[in-house]
Image: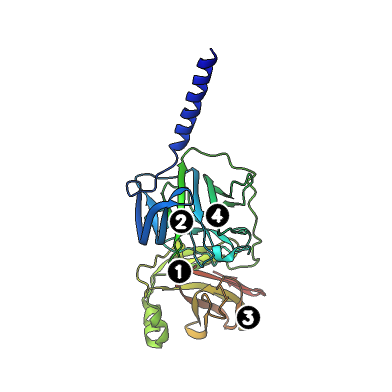
Amino acid sequence: MKLLLKTLFIISILHFNSLNGQNTIPINTDNWQINAKSYVLESFKGKDAIYLVGGIMKLKDRTFLNGTIEFDIYLKNATAYPGVYFRLINDIHGEQWYIRPHQSGNPDANQAAPIINGITPWQLCVGEKYSFKYNYKYDDWTHVKIMVKDDKAQVFLDYSEQPNLSWNLFNTSKSGEIVLRGGNRDGMYIANVSVDNSTPNLVNFKPIERKAISGLISKWAISNPFKESILNDKELLNKQLNSTKWLGSIEVEEGTAANISRKVQIKDRAVNTVFAKIEIDSNKDQQKLFHFGYSERVVLLLNGQLIYKGSNKFRSRDYRYLGTIGLYDAAYLNLKKGSNTLIMAVAEDFGGWLVTGKFDDSSGLKIK
């Protein structure tokens, strides 16, 4: 009897390990589509791993909606952004979480953000709602676990029992691909990738709320995209204004700014500019101070007249400047009685295609 019980116990342990092992996906070209500057499959620090340089590895023949994604990564103290995309559709829509190993111990040591029409708006997703302080180690493996359920996600580092971050996802819940990425030109080792598609029970889900900016213009009309170079030629600019097609409106997100990439996809890096428009009905001739923000560059036109040009791009104001979105610029608008058209021509490079604005004193105005 003792021998039988011992045998059954061993069989149950082997069965459990077998089931558990089904979630671990060997890192090879049978399971992963690897697109990188270079990579090496080798044993490293006791684990079968891939050394991934300047590229990604996409899980083949499998989609992900709800479940748990886990992997180990061996970090370097380098400017890099290793992490994971999930629910990725056509490489341009999805969710992601990634690490900034060079920001160890800082509030932006990592990032939760969507990818929308090929753009990651991290310049919108700023603060403790989307990232957390963490002291990374560079002499051992870091374990990452991400749990996803419907419109919610959590990340746990180094086998923490409590989530390091809980957040509400940005896009509609749809199945998509899983993609891991390494460290740009600084390679990173990745090992022990597992995917469990069973719906998890989230742990202590308490996302941090972000205080909305009061009084923002809630909607902007958005045009078809055009070449930014047109803004440098008044004649070409007028032709563009006269031939513009309006694609609809976009609304403020995260209580901060409207996301142009919700409506427009950049398919040609030269065609990276749109008009964002509001109509202002003024009850008299008057001057009003307008506070605004944008990413990356802007030209303002009031009733067809150029009144402002600026840049808010990454490192445009000093070498540490991030180009995050906020009401950091302002202009006095000379409004006529009746209808006035304010247009912000906004150009994008990366990090978020964004527009926002408000009047401190909107008395006597109606915004359309």
Whether residue 42 is visible to the viewer of this picture, yes or no, is yes
Question: Which quarter of the rendered picture does the C terminus lie within?
Answer: bottom right
| Residue underneath mark 2 | 189
User: Is 226 on the left or on the right of 115, as rendered?
Assistant: left
Please name which of the two marks, 1 or 4, marks the residue nearer to the observer.
4
- Rendered residue at 53%/50% (across/down): 144
How crowded pointer 3 is (Cα within 10 Å; few <14, some 14-19, many 20+) is rated as some
Name the residue nearer the viewer: 20 or 74: 74
| Residue underneath mark 4 | 140
How far, Cα to Cα, is label 2 from label 1?
43 Å
Please name which of the two marks, 2 or 1, marks the residue nearer to the observer.
2
Please name which of the two marks, 3 or 1, marks the residue nearer to the observer.
1
| Residue underneath mark 1 | 222
Which secondary structure lies at badge 3? strand
How far, Cα to Cα, is label 1 from label 4?
48 Å
- Rendered residue at 39%/87% (across/down): 233
